[in-house]
Image (spheres, rainbow, N blue to C red):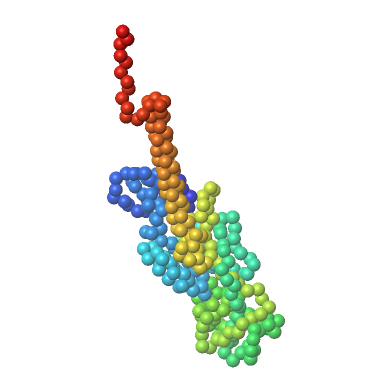
Amino acid sequence: MPPGIRPELRAGRCPISLRQSPASCSVGFSHSCAQAYRYAWVVNGLKIAYVPGVTPGKWLTRWNERYPQSPLQALRYDGETILARLNAGHSDVVFVRFATGSSPKTSEIHVIPLYDESLVVCAAKDHEIELYDGPVPFEDLSEENFLDLADYPESSGGTAMAMEVCASGAGLLVLPLAVARLHHRKDVVHQELSGLPSTSIGIAWLAPVGDEEDDPVIEEFIGVVRGRKENSSRQASVAQRQQEQAVVARKQRQTSAGEAAKAAKTAKSKRKSAARGAKPGAKRGAKPASRGRKN
């Protein structure tokens, strides 16, 4: 079975029902589905999940412009185990947050870092961090009480609840800038923070199993996220189209070469036949002289 097959195909179900007579099938189904395998994702699409603070709108828009027949299923996931969605089959691709330099990449999960995030410190309005013109050094806050997000699981309100506690003046909260903006409150201020490792956003998906290759649909989406042009040869669909065109061109060259060789062989055979049938010195079209009886 070809590499990079979607779960539906691994299970032996073709995602597209082609009401046609049986024909050659690239994945061995009982009906004609060579195109069904190649463009199965046109029907299924991809399931995308992203952590709070990520704004995938531009990538989703770009995808929908290129592949309007295959809308993406995208949702924000506020839980702490977004990578688990991959193994559970709930998502095909996730945008994950991790400490810069500490990629969650494993032998089972591919991760490509996309960009680094700035960290900010959040405090109740009128806190002294408002007096800083630039980043607040972390060492200047050594005597402050800090809230730990781990104490605020999603079941208890998550980051929004932590921000509410921060607004009460009970402690400071360190967040990526994008998350602080997402949970902005008028009674909370934030200032850029220095002296702590930053966080990064990456795109993650399951690594292929055994001799399989990465799903070409996922590669297509990753290309969109990384800014590849629609006609970039690194895009899976473009590479496949170029490969198909190369196969057609090669067959055409082979056919032309075969026809030329056959024509040359025929011409050579005719020349040999003409040479065997002609006598030296005889004029073309002259009748042979009749032999008379000697007296």
| In the depicted structure, whether residue 163 falls above or below residue 56 | below
Picture residue at 40% right of the left edge, 64% below the top: 67
Instruction: Give the quarter of the image for residue 241.
Output: bottom left
Toward which corner of the image does residue 134 lie, by quadrant? bottom right
Q: What quarter of the picture does the C terminus occupy?
A: top left
**Pick the front one: 237 or 45:** 237
Count of numbered tags: 0
x, y percent for residue 123: 59, 85
The structure residue drawn at horizontal position 40% and vertical position 68%, both measured from the top left corner, is 65
- Say which residue appears at 53% left-offset and 65% top-offset: 203
Q: Measured along the vertical axis of the image, is residue 122 above or below residue 108?
A: below
Q: Provide residue 104's location: percent of width, then percent of height.
A: 59, 63
Q: Is residue 144 found left or right of 157 in the rendered image?
A: right
Question: Could you tell me residue 109's position as x and y percent?
Answer: 56, 58
Residue lying furthest top: 295
Left or right, 242 with respect to 136, comes to left
> Hey, which quadrant is residue 45 in on the image?
bottom left
Residue 5 image position (x, y, % from top left): 45, 52
Single out the residue that lies furthest toward the front: 295
Q: Is residue 262 visible?
A: no
* Residue at x 32% of width, y 10% of height: 294
Position of 30 compared to 6: left or right?
Answer: left
Q: Is residue 209 visible?
A: yes
